[in-house]
Amino acid sequence: MNLFRRALLFCASLLMSLVAVSPMLAQSPTSPASSIDPARLPQHTLFYVLWRGAPSTSVRSANSLYALWDDPSFAPARNALFDSFMSESRKSSDAKSQLTREEISEYATLLDNPLAIGFVSDPSKTPSKSVSLKAGTDAHKWNGIFSIYDRSGKENLLAKAVLRMRANEKEPAKLSPTTIAGLPALKMEGKTETNYWLETGHFVVSSGEVSVIEQILRGMRVGGPSTASLIGANDVAALEKALADTKTPVPSSPFLGGVPVFKEANSVLGAGVVEYFVNISDIAKLADDIPTPAGFRAGTALDAMNVKAMHSIVGRVFLEGARTRFQTAVLGDTSEGTIFDIWGAGQAKPASIAYIPQDAVSYREFQVNLPGIYALAMRVAKSFLAKGDQDKTDMFESIGRAKLGMSTSEALHALTGEVGYLQSDFSSDFSKSTFFLGVNNRDNALKLIRHAFVENITADTDFDGVTFFMLSSGNTRTPSGQGNYEAPKYHLAVTDDMILVSTNKAAFRTPLAKKKSPAQPSQLAPFFAAHSGGPAAVNGLSFVDFQKFDWQSLKSLPFQQTTATKPAAKGMFPDKSTPPPQKTWLDEIDPKVFSRHLHLSYGYSWKDANGIHLEGWID
């Protein structure tokens, strides 16, 4: 699939998640009375996703993605979203379960309010013993999934949604009243699992574990940045008494805010419309004793990769006027010998920048640590060998030398680890894109290509300091077995610091011409302006100029539609007997709607002692 189509689908998915909510009755995401404070979640929370509620009308109107969603010309895409929900509903044989478009629109407004979903691990069990026993003989599997919803102003709609969902169940769960932390709750016993539902103050709390709800209630006494209780005054006295008598042990530091991994992530959390947190260190512990198909323990490979050096994955999405900004980080100890070795240290100015022509539409580069990846793979391989057989890994070096014509170390150091692509054409024609790999030692890079692809090289010429190759994989049978088709040819251009790759040699013309020019690419000027004061070296950089892209060309993309008689895998082989595909929303939409609201997108990443950080924005 073309990279622009992927970008379009990503934007559409983001729009669906962020803006498919009513702007009416939207609450401010910073309102203390409706906030859910992640720092007050149970300390054994493995992950959570927090939606802080729909932004205010003024924030929504200023944002370019919201403006795109609200544009009447974008209606086909909005309708396609609703149709996808409705088609899933129609698959049910029960007519009662089918949602109407009006119902979907109505229930979507529940997302006006804050919502948190997550998972709490069993604090009383070790990772290798995830099963406990009930007061009886039945095994009880831990079900620590929870949700917290601020129902302010949505009480009636929430009740309506729950009742409709229950009415559509083929085997409705058995309901029975119970008490949790001294408050009335509802126990829902299904065929395979049991869940609990508790309403208090502004909130609805649900989980499969009573102890998880008790811990959440304990933390909700202090919500958000203020010290105001989120639980009604009538509930506080009952909680004080009930929590003192609860059978769930109270840990010395009962909240997520006291966990070192969460404290480390504080700089990347908060102030976003959406934020998420995953405690990788605890998940890695849970996976230690999981057996692999070969009978080895997963912990063996995890230890070899030193996955424990990775602490968490965190991120957030927030709105800055017209911009929608994204922040993600993989935090941990990036010392040598850890899983972080797969990422390169970065460069102040990536070498590929010199090849960006002034009319480039899209550019993306990232840098990996090739020797670090190889060392990591060798550590994993050795971890599965018996003692005394460690020298068997030498066979990898022998195989590599035979295939590459040089030692593995020489081959890895011939390249810098910089990888990426460049789109110079306005259309979505894949053949006009250029991919590249950074070169550290040109002589060894040429030797590597000539040895590794000796059977595929059909042309090898030098011109103006650049070596051009043409590679072909020969003729291949069609999937139907009828006749041959000529396999794609790949062209390579090797300079002093880069290997350019494309299916069209003409695509090299503008990047190579730009390499000779001292002018800086104007597309990156906004990035460097916004990046001032940021990390000196970046190990990833990208931009998309939506204004230069030919949106009309999306309608002629291959693989846009599949039919029952022509699956996507065979789409490259024309079949005149196949009826033309039905129209999609891309056929019906006015392409100008995208350029009317989308202008630029930038992204960059860097590596430091605390982890890998990624930031970007769409304007």
Image: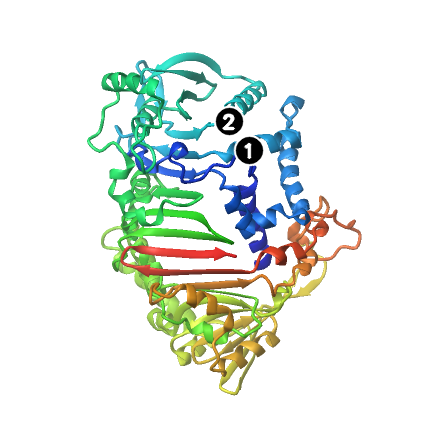
Question: Of 608 and 239, which appears nearest the observer?
Answer: 239
3D distance between C-alphas at marks 1 and 2:
9 Å
Which of the 4 quarters of the picture holds residue 161?
top right
Q: Looking at the picture, how far across and down is residue 314, in whole percent?
A: 37, 47
Image position of 323 (left or right of 444): right
The residue lying at 70 percent from left, 51 percent from top is 589
Q: Looking at the picture, how far across and down is residue 24, in whole percent?
A: 55, 36
User: In what element is the residue under mark 1?
Assistant: helix
Is 30 situated above or below 544? above
Q: Looking at the picture, how far across and down is residue 304, in whole percent?
A: 28, 51
Mark sitting earlier along the chain (1/2): 1
Q: Are marks 1 and 2 in contact (CB under 8 Å)?
A: yes
**Residue 575 visible at all:** yes
User: In what element is the residue under mark 2?
Assistant: loop
**What amino acid is found at the position of numbered circle 1 in the picture?**
Thr
Categorize mark 1 by other alpha carbons within 10 Å: few (<14), some (14-19), many (20+): some
Question: Of 476 and 347, which appears nearest the observer?
Answer: 347
Q: Looking at the picture, how far across and down is residue 356, in whole percent?
A: 51, 73
Is 397 situated above or below 565? below
Question: Of 489 and 55, which appears nearest the observer?
Answer: 55
Q: Which mark is residue 109?
A: 1
Image position of 401 (left or right of 154): left
Categorize mark 2 by other alpha carbons within 10 Å: few (<14), some (14-19), many (20+): some
**What amino acid is found at the position of numbered circle 2 in the picture?**
Lys
Is 590 situated above or below 113? below
In the image as oriented, which residue stretches furthest toward the front? Answer: 58
What residue is shown with label 2? Answer: 154
